[in-house]
Image (cartoon, rainbow, N blue to C red):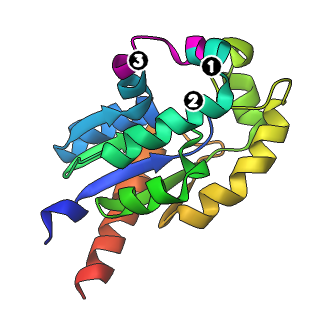
Amino acid sequence: MNQFSTSLILIGMPGAGKSTLGVILAKALAKDFIDTDVLIQLHHNKTLQDIVDTEGYLRLREIEEQVLLKANYPNHIIATGGSAVYSDKAMHHLRHFGQIVFLDTPLAELTARIKDFDTRGLARKPNQSLAELYNERRALYQEYANITIECGGKTQDEILADIIYEEAEAYTERDA
């Protein structure tokens, strides 16, 4: 197997559980974990919200693209920011490292989970609602995903089991 196709790249809306599930998944699969939102903050010594407030949401998307294009993470679980899918170049770059997994979480669940929508540091248009953002991004997540995990009404353990099963199926199909 190519060492550069052993990662799982998690995509999805804010609140879908990419970072939380990513840490647990990395432990379960004996892989390293990286959160690209944290990389952005470390590289710029600012929170995502500070970047949005001082430089704008489009600048945050540009910074995110730059960080993703520099990513070189074989054998990792990579939790991306929710806006990673706005960069076709970055998504194609990430695909070289492994399967892209869309955590497809219903809007109602996201709404219940996200209490800090206005201060979370999201790369979104001013005054754009969570529902509008969801509708705008969902087709992009579906376009880039190799694997889609339906997360609605499931526990973390059920979602993790689904990811591990689907990744194993994809691995089997790749090597068949």
Q: Which image quadrant for residue 107? A: top right
Q: Which quadrant would the C terminus be assigned to in this image?
A: bottom left
The residue located at (39%, 33%) in the rendering is 36
The residue located at (71%, 59%) in the rendering is 139
Q: Secondary structure at mark 3?
A: helix
| Residue 60, label in figure | 2
| Residue 55, label in figure | 1
Q: Which residues are magenta?
A: 42-50
User: Above or below — where is 121 with respect to 46?
Assistant: below
Mark 1 and mark 2 in contact? Answer it, CB < 8 Å: yes
Residue 145 percent location from the top left of the image:
52, 62
Residue 22 covered by magenta stretch: no
Residue 142 percent location from the top left of the image:
62, 62
Q: Which of the pair 19/97 is nearer the observer?
A: 97
Main secondary-structure element of the magenta-colored stretch? helix
> Identity of the amino acid at label 1?
Glu
Label 2 crowd (10 A; few <14 / some 14-19 / many >=20) = many
Residue 79, visible in the rendered structure? no
Give the residue at mark 3: 44
Q: CA distance from mark 1 to mark 2?
A: 7 Å
